[in-house]
Image (tube, rainbow, N blue to C red):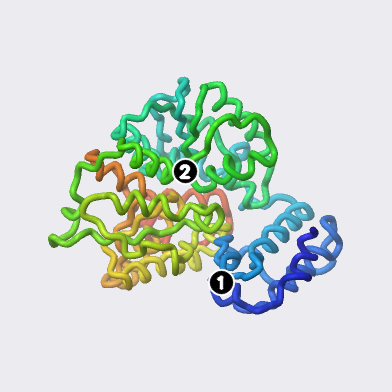
Amino acid sequence: MDLIQVYTDQCSLCGLCIDVCPSYDTVDVIPSLCDYISEGGQTEEKKPLEYDIRLCYTCNVCTVACPEDLGIRKLIAASREKKTKIRGLSKEQMLVDPFSDNNIYKKVGEWESPVEFKNEGRKSKVVYFPGCAASCMNKVVGKSTVRALNAAGVDYSVMSGIEYCCGSVSAGAGNTAPLEKLGQRNIDEINSRGSEILITTCPGCYRAFKMLYPQKFENIQFEVLQTAEYFARLLDEGKLNFKREMSEYTKSNAKLRIYYQDPCHLTRALGVYEDPRKVLSAVPGVELVNPTPEGSICCGFGGGVRTSFPQKSIDQAGSVHEYAKSLGSDIIITNCGGCMKNIIEGGYMSGKENESNAGLPVYDLAEFISIACGSAPTERDDLKLIYLSNKSLCDCLAHYDFKPYEELAAEYDPDLK
């Protein structure tokens, strides 16, 4: 059935989606978007958009809240697709396009060498797909994942995050060309290694292989698992052995209280809620303050909001710290490189404004698990991560204007005035 007809037949404009939406405050956005999508088809804009579709985090909170499983996100996606077809690709939509020079990961790669993983290219039953972000930007995620795999004694190979991109993030921004060009190539490469299991870190990569590729490509001969799902399997098989009592990371003898941040594109979009909690709950000396996803909120990174409205995005990330603190958390753990980066930045900026309001420590799931398994903590530099991610956006987007970054640049790199 046509999308607009579905909304016409099923949406009662009850406003439950607006009650939970972090971006829009009126249910009128729904009929307005329906009008935009339907008028003139996919080739003509009869009238401009009444609401700014760049404001949507694509967090799917609205969809979960809707009794008809509708919400706002589906209309945002269709509106963005139409706008792209009519106006062409914007610079924002090229930011993670591997075929574009206006690519933030290429920019960071010019300043910092990407991660070169061992075991790249060889045949193996298990293959790890780190993706662009874990190889070039938030490197602690990719490095920690292989440390956790090593600790569990897994025989695996790695697909280079430099040579292989899933195309999902570009597709989510309305630029589908990378996914269409790269999907079958990625599938064929994994099959050629004789792999039975593909592990992904990034929720976007997971969505590509799990949901988007089966709709477009053929011959997928392997199982697709996100790292949390694979860690849970290793736990069940007795291969994930925790050697460190994590309560030693607290200042008292009490258990380490963890707030698990549910990445929107992994949980509400793809249903991976229980596995990360199952693994974390098995770690000695920890306690989950949110054993269920009820009340989970968006980190503010997704949907392109971070590039168009950086302060709005960072304010939302600060809300994650506030919520985690309200539950008595010691640390925040998430399972998405984008969430991790944004939440780190949100906590840092909150502390800059008011030292007493500084954020909690933020860890990646694989990073925490590798430490619990006895590995040395993965080297990381949070200020460098914040600095380089903002610098890459400044270099790729002439309009990118984020005053707190200018202060950080002067602090982190005195030569950059």
Residue 160 x %, y %: 48, 30
User: Which residue is found at the position 67% from the left and 47% from the top?
Assistant: 175
Query: Does residue 218 lie above or below 79 as drawn?
Result: above
Left or right of 284, for residue 278: right
Q: How many marks?
A: 2
Q: Secondary structure at mark 1?
A: loop
Residue 202 x %, y %: 48, 45
Kindly tell me whether residue 414 is visible in this rendering: no
Going by the numbered disc 1, the residue's amino acid type is: Cys
Q: Indicate which disc, 2 or 1, sits on the residue closer to the N terminus.
A: 1
User: Which residue is found at the position 30% from the left and 48% from the top?
Assistant: 368
Residue 104 x %, y %: 52, 45
Going by the numbered disc 2, the residue's amino acid type is: Gln
User: Which residue is found at the position 54% from the left and 52% from the top?
Assistant: 270
Find disc 2 in the rendering and name its residue.
226
Q: Which mark is residue 341?
A: none
Q: Looking at the image, is mark 2 or mark 1 nearer the viewer? A: 2
